[in-house]
Amino acid sequence: MAVPDELSVTPTAHLGAQRLREVRALLDEAFAGDLDDEDVRHALGGLHVLAVLDGRLTGHAALVQRSLLVAGRWVRAGYVEAVAVDPAHQRRGLGSALMGVVEGLAARAHEGAFLGASEEGALLYRQRGWRPWLGPSGVLAPDGPRPTPDDDGCLHVHDPAGAWDVTAPLVCDWRDGDVW
């Protein structure tokens, strides 16, 4: 198990240009170039959990605030973005360490924590008490509500106690690029 030398929480406004470049480089490496500028912008404006190992940024997770409509009720949600671990350090506990901090932050500041996950990422999240959202997903687009069936099955809520009705409709606020 890799134990980071440093695990810190920093708001986007305090990251600085050099650290933002390091985050972007880590995301590009971890996601094999599969993230575009819009995806990276989605991770800005909230809190960043950073893992440093041997003096190098090796892990990142962001928690941003979003408004989600859950079963007809607006929820102030902590939405997790851009969770990444340097490929040379994956499967050694850094992702879990990052998520532990994110989950604690979300529990203190939000009504719920949500994220969209790849199949590979979902394994980590499910082990940590995240449940897949089974209900239909949608977005409140500028032209009105719109279903997002391609995202069904990818969305998760941090719900170790089983308190959320994961079969209810889940609708997100609008943003450019991938809405979820």
Image: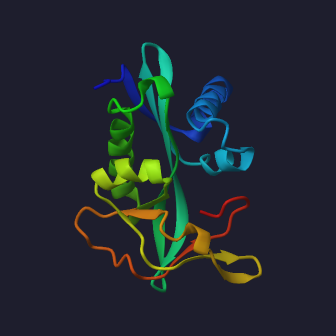
Along the line of sight, which residue is nearer the eye, 114 or 11? 114
The N terminus - image quarter: top left
Q: Is residue 128 above or below residue 71?
A: above
In this picture, residue 70 sits left or right of residue 23 = left
Q: Is residue 51 above or below residue 173?
A: above
| Residue under the point 71% across and 76% down | 141
Along the line of sight, which residue is nearer the eye, 57 or 36? 36
The C terminus - image quarter: bottom right
Measured as percent of width and height from the top left, residue 170 is found at: 50, 76
- Residue reaching furthest front? 119
- Residue reaching furthest bottom? 72
| Residue under the point 44% across and 22% down | 52
- Residue reaching furthest top? 54
In this picture, residue 33 sits left or right of residue 172 = right
Q: Is residue 140 above or below residue 122?
A: below
Measured as percent of width and height from the top left, residue 149 is found at: 59, 75
Measured as percent of width and height from the top left, residue 18 is found at: 65, 23
Along the line of sight, which residue is nearer the eye, 46 or 1? 1
In this picture, residue 127 sits left or right of residue 64 = left
Measured as percent of width and height from the top left, residue 166 is found at: 37, 75
